[in-house]
Amino acid sequence: MWNVVFNKGFGPSFPVRLVKCSVKEAELLPTADSLYWDSPISPDGIQQSLRLLSWIEENKNSNKYARLLAGDDQEHTSVMASSNLRRAVSTGMIALSARLLRGEEAPSAGGHRQEQIYVMSALQ
């Protein structure tokens, strides 16, 4: 909701978007949920994450950054980390899903999967 309200510009429709979101936020007051603080990934965010996934998979053989994101770089290692916001975790899970699913096939010592996303509240 944050993106829908604040990232679409401050033109004539801004007050309408703000009021609509504020009403929805008020409906969530009895719960521990929030649209402003920790909103779920939006449909736009899902599409952007899928485009990033496609870019990584299409370019991992020719682009060093795509190769690193894909977890296929033989010279460098990488760790996946995310803030604890739902939309950030969702973005990582979607965009790096090929890497995460590949990791399921190769358990590491201790019975843990080799690939995981570390959720770190300090990244908010």
Image (cartoon, rainbow, N blue to C red):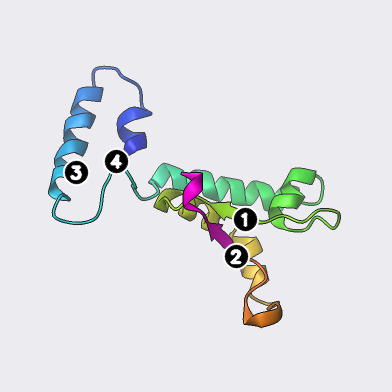
Q: Is residue 90 magenta?
A: no
Q: Earlier in the sequence, mark 3 or mark 2?
A: 3
Q: Is residue 120 magenta?
A: yes
- Label 4 secondary element: loop
Where is mark 4, residue-wise?
36
**CA gap, disc 2 and disc 4:** 27 Å
**CA gap, disc 2 and disc 1:** 7 Å
Task: Tally the marks.
Answer: 4
Where is mark 2, residue-wise?
116
Q: Are marks 2 and 4 in contact (CB under 8 Å)?
A: no
Where is mark 3, residue-wise?
25
Badge 3 crowding class, 10 Å Cα cut-off, few under 14, some 14 to 19, many 20 or more, is some
Name the residue nearer the viewer: 7 or 111.
111
Residue at the extreme top of the image, as rendered:
11
Quadrant assignment for the N terminus: top left
**CA gap, disc 3 and disc 2:** 32 Å
The amino acid type, in three-letter code, at marker 2 is Gln
**CA gap, disc 4 and disc 1:** 25 Å
Where is mark 1, residue-wise?
80
Residue range of the region highlighted in magenta in the rendering? 117-124
The amino acid type, in three-letter code, at marker 1 is Met
